[in-house]
Amino acid sequence: MIYAAVLAGGIGSRMGADKPKQFLEFGGKPVIIHTVERFLECDEIDKVIVMTPADWCDYTRNLLTQYFGDLSSGTGEEMTGSADKDSRVNARITVAAGGSTRNETLMNAISVIEADGNLNEETIIVTHDAVRPFVTDRMIRENIAAAKATGACETAFPATDTIIETDDGRLVASVPDRSRLWMVQTPQTFRAKKLRELYMSLTEEEKEVLTDAARIYVMKGEAVGIVRGESWNIKITYPQDIQVAETVEEQLCKE
């Protein structure tokens, strides 16, 4: 089976809002709703797991119910509801609590898959930031194909600015060759069972330096494929990004 894990575990402290940034609105809907819609629209995705801070699980469930109807339970069993088309789509969504780090949240998502009875060598998990609402069908499908072929992949876009390295935030240590640098986006996609095995093999020191799941594979000498992203596949992090999202939405709707 193919699962999408929408990672909404952060609290958005840099946004300065009274609720996590995934619940802020643009285009008349919360950010997270835009994102979940993209995955529900892809017929290759069997189920969407929305990972959210534990204190926000009920809020998230209520919000998703408002837009998509009754949700499935965390064990893969359907909640009572009608058997129409909407009910079948709703059964694809599960809400679960995230962990204290991004990768712990991802491991929790894999635990949901295991509870469903669907964790095996062929299971694919497409992981994506809840606050990247402009993921495209093309990115999702190419991620799935690349993970099936390679075992792991991440979405990235060629760097357009010169990037420097610094040891202390005051002086430039080096200026890497920009032609070899790509900016990481999401989705990042993996064979779920292999990902958990590699994560569990890490030392505590190795876990502390992780910034994303793909780095686990690099640390262990495993291949990671690249799917080309898009310049508009932005991550909403700061207050001004909501206005940027409004502009991107308007532009994409015109195309």
Image (cartoon, rainbow, N blue to C red):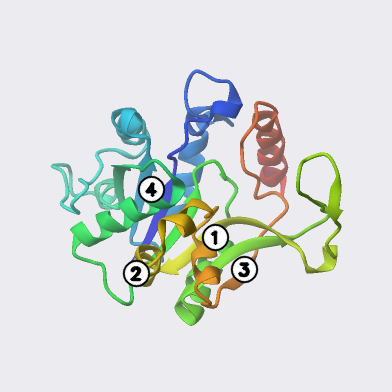
Residue 41 found in image quarter: bottom left
Asked whether the residues under the numbered discs 3 and 4 touch, taking CB atoms below 8 Å apart as contact, a structural biologist would say no
**Looking at the image, do the residues carrying marks 1 and 3 touch, with CB atoms under 8 Å apart?**
no
Q: Amino acid at mark 2?
A: Glu
Marks 2 and 1, the one that precedes in the sequence = 1
Q: Pointer 4: what residue? A: 105
Does residue 165 appear to the left or right of 241 in the view shown? right
Residue sitting at x 27%, y 73%: 120
- Residue at image location 46% in from the left, 38% down from the top: 33
Image side of residue 50 versus residue 150, left or right: left
Rounded to the nearest angstrom, the CA distance separating label 1 from label 3 is: 12 Å
**Which label lies toward us, 4 or 1?**
4
Determine whether the residue tagged by mark 1 lies in a helix, strand or loop.
helix
Task: Tell me which corner region of the image, top left, top right, bottom left or bottom right, holds residue 199.
Answer: bottom left
Depth check, mark 4 against mark 2: the one in front is 2
- What secondary structure is marked by label 3? strand
- Label ID, residue 67: none
**CA–CA distance in space, label 2 to label 1:** 29 Å
Q: Which residue is mark 1?
A: 137
Pick the residue in front: 5 or 43.
5
Q: Kindly report which numbered mark, 1 or 3, lies closer to the viewer in this rendering.
A: 3
**Which residue bears the numbered disc 3?**
227
**Label 2 SS:** helix
Nearer the viewer's eye, disc 2 or disc 3? 2
Question: Could you tell me the amino acid type at mark 4?
Answer: Thr
User: Which mark, by number, is residue 197?
Assistant: 2
Q: Going from the N terminus, do you reach mark 3 or mark 4 first? A: 4
| Residue 42 horizontal/vertical position (percent) | 45, 60
Structural distance between the alpha carbons of marks 3 and 4: 23 Å
Q: Nearer the viewer, mark 2 or mark 1?
A: 2
Q: Position of residue 102 (x, y in %)?
A: 45, 47
The percent coordinates of residue 90 (x first, y second) are 29, 47
